[in-house]
Image (tube, grey):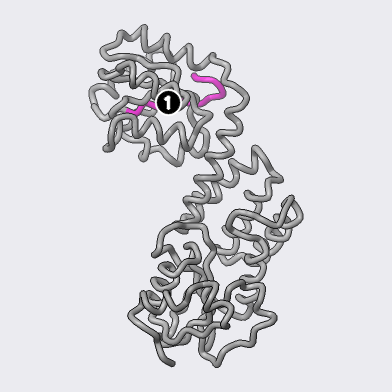
Amino acid sequence: MSPNGKRILVVERDASGRALMDRVLGSSELGTDAVASVKDVEDALDRDAYALAIIDELAGSGAMLDEVRSVRRRWPRLPVIVTGTILSARVLVDLMRIGVYEALPKPFLPDELREAVSRCLVRAWPGEVTALEFEAAVMAAREALAVLDLPRALAMLQRAHGIAPLDPEVVALDALRAELAGDDHHAERWYRAALSLADDVSVAPPDPREGLARLDAYRGLGRGARVEAGWSAWIVEDLRSLVREPEPARPYVLVTTIGLSSAIDAPIHLRVGEDRCVAASLGAQRPETLACLLDRLALGAIVASAEARTSLDLDRVEALRGGPHEP
């Protein structure tokens, strides 16, 4: 078996090629999983189930080296052997740049495959790969949160916590995951922890201070209900200013953005009551995002302070929606 009971991953589009490598490595008592695409084993990769990956340069359905680049970006600690028939000098340079130091031209002999596997399994990987692993885990967590894939976000955050358990960005992302799951108790604890761990007041989204302000706004609201069409949209520049701004005439939807996604039509996290609601878009706070959000919720008039109307360019939001919306 491979070190620590882990297996060898073979990623090859050609079924006969997968079967051949499976037989060769099986004869060396190395457990293998042979698949056509990395997408088939993402969960196992997240669990750190493999000691090594053997990936064909044309694996998957994309362009050359797409699957290789994806594995290096998302699981940078995993050693990779690249196989292929087009391993030109340019391709070899590209592989070195992304951290792949073992390439096996096709056709190859069984002994050549075994020797390449042995070299990778005993190679001492540089310590700085830990930083790459942490960066990859945080990036993957952000990507998962941006599409509300909370189970994957949890798995990625656990990877990041294992490397840097007191990193304020990771703690803030974990707080957001709890918030999106409706676990406000733990979200509040982790947002406060992120604040105490942060070295300065400028933090990447999600901002723990805004997270705490959203939790305050959620109080008394439920999850899973629908917004009534035509309700007013209450937009403020900063949720932390709510203590200074009077609530508009009800019913209304308090609209805010979290800034995690660049997509205009980013997912929305809703908390709904009988006559008020909080709609938190995962997108960035810009006119296009706000206009899309208001239209998706079929909201009516925009209620905002003069400060927010100017700083958030709400005139532009109304123009994108086809003109001012009267109460």
Which residue does the image show at 54% across and 14% down from the upper left? 122
Which residue does the image show at 49% across and 62% down from the upper left? 284
Outermost front residue? 310
In the rendered image, is residue 189 in sight?
Answer: yes
Image quarter where the C terminus lies is bottom left
Q: Give the range drawn in magenta.
A: 1-11
Q: Residues within 10 Å of mark 1 (few under 14, many from 20)?
A: many
Which residue does the image show at 47% across and 12% down from the upper left? 118
Q: Is residue 34 above or below residue 271?
A: above
Q: Is residue 105 above or below residue 206?
A: above
Which residue does the image show at 39% across and 20% down from the upper left? 93
- Dot 1 corresponds to which residue? 53
Q: Is residue 71 magenta?
A: no
Q: In this view, does 144 lie to the left or right of 56?
A: right
Residue 209: horizontal and vertical position, in percent? 67, 64
Residue 162: horizontal and vertical position, in percent? 64, 39
**Residue type highlighted by circle 1:** Ala
Q: Is residue 247 above or below residue 54?
A: below
For numbered disc 1, what is the local secondary structure? strand
